[in-house]
Image: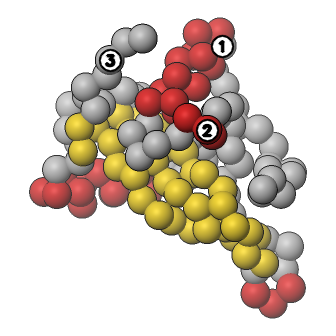
Amino acid sequence: MRARAWQGLAVEKLRQWQEVFSASRESWRVRGGCPICLHEDCLYRHYQVGVVVEGASGRTRRLARGGLWEWCSGCWTFVHYAAMVPSWWGGGLEVDEARLTAVPDALQDAVDALSGGMESVEPKERDGSLERG
Ligand SMILES: [Zn+2]
């Protein structure tokens, strides 16, 4: 197995990093350039959906507590947060959750598996994706 040189995000780059990620909220593929290595199309994110919390005021929208990974496959910079899973999140990466750790190695394997076959992969429909667990 390839060893990836994962490195935690430097604190002084946190603001630029979060600006890029917050500007792209449609899937596990993040548009924009990495503020560390300056490459394009190498940023990814994944939410692990944990406990589902019913939204307030009876709306169908659901939120869930979970974990969030953000990483770059150009320079192997990564961040792992505890986070609320946003309502726009539709999943899309087939991940072996037993292999998930703070370091997104299993997640990059999932990206590699998808990128090997198809040029453009759309995130799955979100029906049922928050029901697991
Ligand atoms: Zn990078």
Residue to which mark 1 is pinned: 118
Residue at position x 55%, y 35% from top? Answer: 99
Residue 31 seen from this side: no
Residue to which mark 3 is pinned: 3
Question: Is the residue 133 above or below the residue 62 in the image?
Answer: above
Measured as percent of width and height from the top left, residue 20 is found at 36, 50
Q: Is residue 48 left or right of residue 72?
A: right
Residue 98, disc: 2
Residue at position x 76%, y 38% from top? Answer: 124
Q: Residues within 10 Å of mark 3 (few under 14, many from 20)?
A: few
- Mark closer to the chain start, 3 or 1: 3
Which of pointers 2 and 3 indicates the residue nearer the eye? 2
Question: Is the residue 57 above or below the residue 23 in the image?
Answer: below
Quarter of the picture holding the N terminus: top left
Measured as percent of width and height from the top left, residue 23 is found at 44, 54
Which of the 4 image quadrants contains residue 104?
A: top left
Marks 2 and 3, Cα distance to the nearest angstrom?
19 Å
Q: Is residue 95 left or right of residue 76?
A: right
Question: Is the residue 25 above or below the residue 65 in the image?
Answer: above
The disc labelled 2 sits on which kind of residue? Ala
Which of the 4 image quadrants contains residue 64?
A: bottom right
Q: SS class of the residue under badge 3? A: loop
Q: SS class of the residue under badge 2? A: helix
The disc labelled 3 sits on which kind of residue? Ala
Measured as percent of width and height from the top left, residue 130 is found at 78, 57
